[in-house]
Image: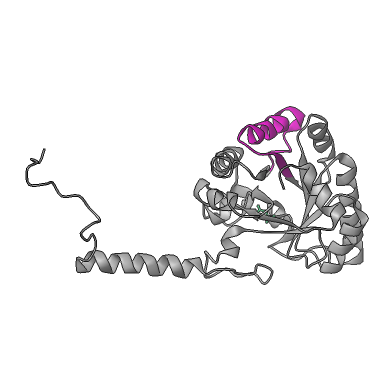
Amino acid sequence: MKTIPDFQKRKAAGEAITMVTCYDAATAKILNGTSVDSILVGDSCAMVVHGFDSTVHATVDMLAMHTEAVRRGAPDKVIVADMPFLSYRKGLIESTESAARLMRAGANAVKIERCRGNLELIQSLVEAGVPVMGHLGLTPQAVNEFGGFKVQAKTDKAAETLVREAKELELAGCFSIVLECVPAEVAKRATEALAIPTIGIGCGPDTSGQVLVINDLLGMDSDFHPKFARRYANLSVVIADSVEAYSDDVRSGSFPAKGEYTRLRREQTAI
Ligand code: KIV
């Protein structure tokens, strides 16, 4: 996938879209060499990189800095940047300026959580040439309203609201919608009701694609393992074991060894 319109083509062709989050240039460089379709510079960086307990702490400055780093590492990937908590509720002018900062930082699109109250801004950004990804279901910026990170849209009424809002986001011009932690049946209904693709996380198999937080996928946090996040590696163990091995080698004197440093030749004099 090379461009935002490719999202639509993938859904039309029935081909799954793959997306992972990323926050730094080193990891982005690795992703740039993979077949993953798209990178999300998620406001989850407030939690997994900066150690906060929710994404409420993410700021435009934070997201712009991470987006710049990811773009430097992944020049060839389609990058979506999250508009952080309340940054899109500051009136059209200031909210548009926040979106502009993320686009200038290297994003190809921005993502905005929830529907109600956001449609005018979404329409205005889309008209101005800024692709917008929607986000419904468990929208983590509203964790205080939900009383925790809980599965959403479990009742008929809530499911109906979600499908209606998904259609409203599509009508406003969103090119895709993230569905997070809603029952698989609800995700399927929403996906079937839309022409644009849905990207699921914790929503089962019937969305147009999947997104995972890269730290979860790589097993960076041994204490955090939500059931929807399949672990493809156990990097927390790999990192801890590597640092222990290094520390043992330093203490035993086996690091650094010959070949891992420079000695002056006999005829040279030390400065
Ligand atoms: O910020 C994020 O990582 C996200 C994904 C969970 C979709 O919004």
User: What residue is drawn where x is 87% and y is 63%?
Assistant: 188
Q: Residue 4 falls in which quadrant of the image?
A: top right
Left or right, 163 with respect to 17, comes to: right
Left or right, 244 with respect to 260, comes to: right
> In the rendered view, would you say 127 is above or below 232?
above
- The quarter of the rendered structure image containing the C terminus is top left
> In the rendered view, would you say 247 is above or below 60?
below
**Ligand 1 occupies quarter:** bottom right
Between residue 57 and residue 222, name the one nearer to us.
Answer: 222
Q: How is the image coloured?
A: one colour
Residue 142 placed where, x, y %?
A: 72, 53
The stretch of residues the image draws in magenta is 86-111
Residue 55 placed where, x, y %?
A: 62, 51
User: What residue is drawn where x is 46% and y is 70%?
Assistant: 237
User: What residue is drawn where x is 77% and y is 41%?
Assistant: 132
Magenta stretch contains residue 100: yes
